[in-house]
Image (cartoon, rainbow, N blue to C red):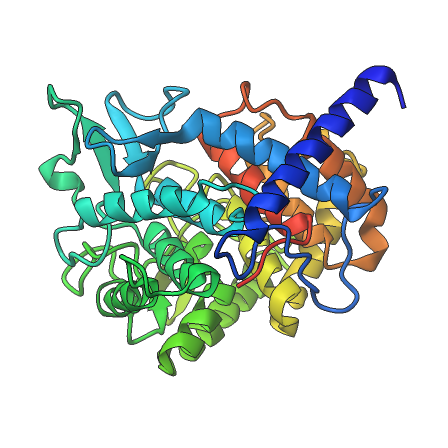
Amino acid sequence: MSGMLCLRFCIFVSVFALFRLAALGSEEKRPFPQHTVYTKGTIKPSAKNQVELDLAVIEFYRAWKAKYLRTAADGQQRYVFCNVDKTFPKNTHSVSEGHGYGMLAAVLMAGADPEARADFDGLYRFFRAHPADHNTDLMAWRQISKKKNGALTEEPDERDSATDGDLDIACALLMADAQWGSRGTINYRKEALKVIAAIKKSETDPERHTLTLGSWVDRENSHWGGTRPSDFMPAHFKSFGEATGDPVWSQITDATYRLFHELAAAQNPQTGLIPDFVVWKGNRFQPAPPNYLETKEDGHYSYNSCRVPWRVGTDYLLTGDPRALKLLQPLNAWIQKTTGGKPEKINAGYHLDGKILDEDESGAFTAPMAVAAMTDPNSQAWLDALWANLLARDVAREHYFENSLKLMTMIVVSGNWWQ
């Protein structure tokens, strides 16, 4: 080991030791690192030891937090500043999707970050300060700055909810109860149950047992019956079912895998690729037409569905659900073959048959594939290459979305996601 590498390693070991000492005197019940025992037969990146994986996560988490976590004007609330890189419309500061990532990161990194609970509580207060119009236990999807005092608000037509953010917020609140208990100033479990009930009431389709795009979609809306597959988080649904005893979450889990498998069989049996959006047509779900909600790529594997391997892969790692493995096996095999085992050749979007949609390269597409690779013991070299690719990505050169997915997936891939 060179002198510089030795110094860097010693610094990280010292920082890690300090964080662990802080955790010993704190109230965390599941402090980072957790070293979760995943489903038998799954793999992690080859490393000299587990500490090496843990330190990589801590290093990136600190960089992510420094770049994106902000304190609101009142000094009490926290939010994830998604527009550091100016990739959102002018004056955008926060979106509920990113807020969910922030709450998950805080509760998962507690123990490695002495400020985690204060950050989490501040994020919770921001969530409560920005409710959705149709259901105040959900979050308005976008917050902007247009007041002289620096306070964030929403435009009247942006007070709708977005389902993915609400799902992560609810799950993070359940995890906060497991992490810190609910006898403090915030009853995390009670608040989680409120959000879960609101999701069921305002963001689910009881006919098809699927999710809607948000609380703004009702039976009279032209988007009724449409859904975004990246919102389907089966591990979350299983946690909601355990917390509430409500069988609807098992029904939604079953519908999730049925939708995925039917789509794959009809559209893409060799690739396992799932489109950004799907619509109900002819008594089944089909890829959405261009510009259904966001872009002309709505019916392809693009910047929404790139998260599916992470969401489905996490469910397999935690629960061993064979339906997850059935979806991930062809996807993992196809992406290795199409790239020749070189992560830098993963493109930022594909047609469902595997043809390249976007020649660009993005960490948002690379990082989730590492979770899929963990499900195959024969993919060790591929997983190691993906992990190396993630570590080489500079937080300063990547955008909020890529960096946030990198953080989420690094926690999973290092063996430290729990639910």
Q: State the residue at coordinates (33%, 39%).
A: 294
User: Residue extending furthest front?
Assistant: 25
Q: Is residue 215 above or below residue 306?
A: below
x then y, percent, for residue 234:
49, 66
Q: Position of residue 171 (x, y in %)?
A: 41, 60
- Tell me if I can see residue 98 in this picture: yes
Left or right of 108: which side holds 392? right
Outermost residue, right side: 1
Tell whether 295 sits left or right of 159.
Answer: right
Nearest the viewer among 52 and 397 is 52
Res. 346 image quadrant: top right
Q: Is residue 270 visible?
A: no
In the rendered image, the vertical position of residue 298 relative to residue 199, given as above or below: above
Viewer-side residue, 70 vs 348: 70
Nearest the viewer among 374 and 252 is 374
Indicate whether 3 appears above or below 269: above
Q: Position of residue 388 (x, y in %)?
A: 75, 33
